[in-house]
Image (cartoon, rainbow, N blue to C red):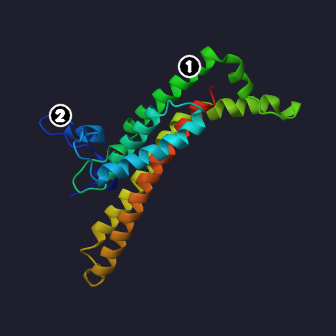
């Protein structure tokens, strides 16, 4: 029995090893369509999604180097959707997972920008048309906004995944206590799962698109 509502997100240890974190590696088991002898409809569907993302990310990055962002989108999407399955650990609800994705990306963008294009990075701290009296404040605001970017990326993803899982946990615990309203509870759970599936897709897209925008600012 749960002693805490947030204990559903605790990784249980088996044989002295946190095996729940191994669920993140399941995404690597999805073989790309190029290795299939006869691609099925699912392969064509995934391929169309990847082509659409490539066209959109190519406009933002102004080049064809979109593989890392498409891979990031698919990796987060698969982990978010797997977290909705029963008895599967939700890795994307932990800051250890989200921050380990956001922090290296942001740090690499910043290092590349400040080393290779220092003048542009300094100019980015001062928006065009800023009144002279507001220039010191704008530099501080832009600096703080750049520093907190990995934190906002990580917290946005984990908070959205936690919120939906907590709602489903609360409804699941109140189901046995309202036998007369069990049908209504099941319908609410079904609609909530559909909503969480949409949230999983949207949050993976938001994470990837914001990473793409951050990379385009350092060029």
* Secondary element at tag 1: helix
The residue that appears at 44% across and 46% down in the rendered structure is: 204
> Mark 2 = which residue?
17
Farthest residue toward the front? 38
Q: CA distance from mark 2 to mark 1?
A: 35 Å
Farthest residue toward the left? 15
Query: Which percent across, then down, holds residue 74?
Result: 38, 43
Query: Which percent across, then down, holds residue 84?
Result: 31, 56
Tell me if 60 is positioned left or right of 120 in this view.
Answer: left
Query: In the rendered view, would you say 174 is above or below 133?
Result: below
Q: Check disc 1: other Cα within 10 Å, few if <14, some if 14-19, many if 20+.
A: few
Farthest residue toward the right? 132
* Secondary element at tag 2: loop
Judging depth in this view, the residue of 67 and 208 nearest the camera is: 67
The residue that appears at 81% across and 30% down in the rendered structure is: 135
Is residue 38 visible to us here? Answer: yes
Counting labels gives 2
Tell me if 85 is positioned left or right of 140 in this view.
Answer: left
């Amino acid at each position: 029995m749960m002693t805490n509502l947030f204990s559903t997100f605790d990784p249980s240890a088996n044989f002295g090893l946190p095996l729940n974190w191994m669920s993140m590696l399941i995404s690597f088991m999805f073989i790309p369509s190029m290795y299939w002898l006869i691609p099925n409809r699912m392969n064509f569907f995934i391929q169309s999604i990847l082509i659409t993302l490539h066209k959109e990310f190519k406009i933002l990055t102004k080049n064809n180097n979109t593989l890392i962002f498409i891979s990031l989108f698919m990796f987060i999407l698969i982990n978010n959707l797997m977290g909705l399955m029963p008895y599967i650990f939700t890795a994307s609800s932990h800051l250890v997972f989200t921050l380990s994705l956001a922090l290296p990306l942001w740090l690499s963008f910043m290092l590349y920008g400040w080393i290779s294009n220092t003048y542009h990075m300094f100019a980015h701290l001062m928006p065009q048309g800023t009144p002279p009296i507001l220039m010191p404040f704008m530099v501080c605001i832009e600096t703080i906004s750049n520093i907190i970017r990995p934190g906002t990326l990580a917290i946005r993803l984990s908070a959205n995944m936690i919120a939906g899982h907590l709602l489903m946990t609360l409804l699941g615990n109140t189901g046995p206590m309202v036998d007369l309203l069990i049908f209504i509870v099941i319908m609410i759970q079904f609609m909530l799962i559909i909503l969480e599936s949409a949230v999983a897709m949207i949050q993976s897209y938001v994470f990837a698109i914001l990473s793409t925008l951050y990379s385009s600012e350092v060029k």
